Amino acid sequence: MTRRILHVVSNVAHYDDPSEPTGLWLSELTHAYEVFEKHGLEQRIVSPKGGRSPLEPRSLAWPNIDATAKAWLADDARMALLANTARPDEIDTADFDAIYLTGGHAVMWDFPDSLGLQRLTCDIWEHGGIVSSVCHGYCGLLNAKLSDGTLLVDGRRLTGFSWREEVLARVSKKVPYNAEEEIRQRGALYERGVLPFTSKVVVDGRLVTGQNPQSAKATAEQVAALL
């Protein structure tokens, strides 16, 4: 039976200041999508509200954009997937073997408190599936509670975009909270790479997380290997 992956993307288009655009960091989706495609996995894209997922402008400029992102931008069918994402209530988690939460600063606003996203994540986990995230995608794990009331991340090793990287990216004063600190406060055993903006993946059983955009491909490869 073909394995199925559920990608999660943001609906948010800007920071608190509407003149400061943000959105999905495109390569975090495209790198994973390409890996999963090569492994013959079926894929679907969902967002907290459904509909359009805006793109982070910085992810579309040199040196951040790469061949996979350029190919996606040039493919009308692929772009249509981001123009009409599914809503959480349209998803039957029994159909999916893994969930992959993408990043971009946008997710810091709509991932943590999305009850629909929390349901998808925890249902897939409790059905024996894989929960994975890359970069800021781990913001979607902040408030994910299992059926016994415990936080999914409590006591588990993981990684995600570090506060040091926020500072180096010059956005530490624009983001609504320190995601690294928030995840630690929830009992997660946070890890980060020695060097910022280099690939770092942490695998703790069925929880697979990547630190930054540079980690997306390796994160997806680990998910595919587990499947």
Image (cartoon, rainbow, N blue to C red):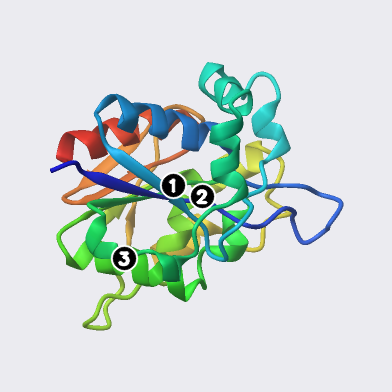
Q: Quadrant of the C terminus?
A: top left
Q: Nearer the viewer, mark 2 or mark 3?
A: 3
Picture layout, residue 155 above or below residue 167 = below
Look at 31% across and 32% down and name the residue there.
36
Distance between the Cα atoms at labels 1 and 3?
27 Å
Q: Secondary structure at mark 3?
A: loop
Q: Secondary structure at mark 2?
A: helix
Q: Amino acid at mark 3?
A: Asp
Distance between the Cα atoms at labels 1 and 2?
6 Å
First-in-chain label (2 vs 3): 3
Q: Dividing the picture into quarters, in which one does residue 63 lie?
A: top right
Which residue does the numbered mark 3 point to in the structure image? 92
Picture layout, residue 63 above or below residue 183 = above
Q: Nearer the viewer, mark 1 or mark 3?
A: 3
Specify whether residue 119 is in view.
Answer: yes
Relative image position of residue 112 (x, y in whole percent)? 50, 67
Which residue does the numbered mark 2 point to in the structure image? 136
Instruction: Name the residue furthest right.
Output: 19
Distance between the Cα atoms at labels 2 and 3?
25 Å
First-in-chain label (1 vs 3): 3
Which residue does the numbered mark 1 point to in the structure image? 160
Specify whether residue 194 is in view.
Answer: no
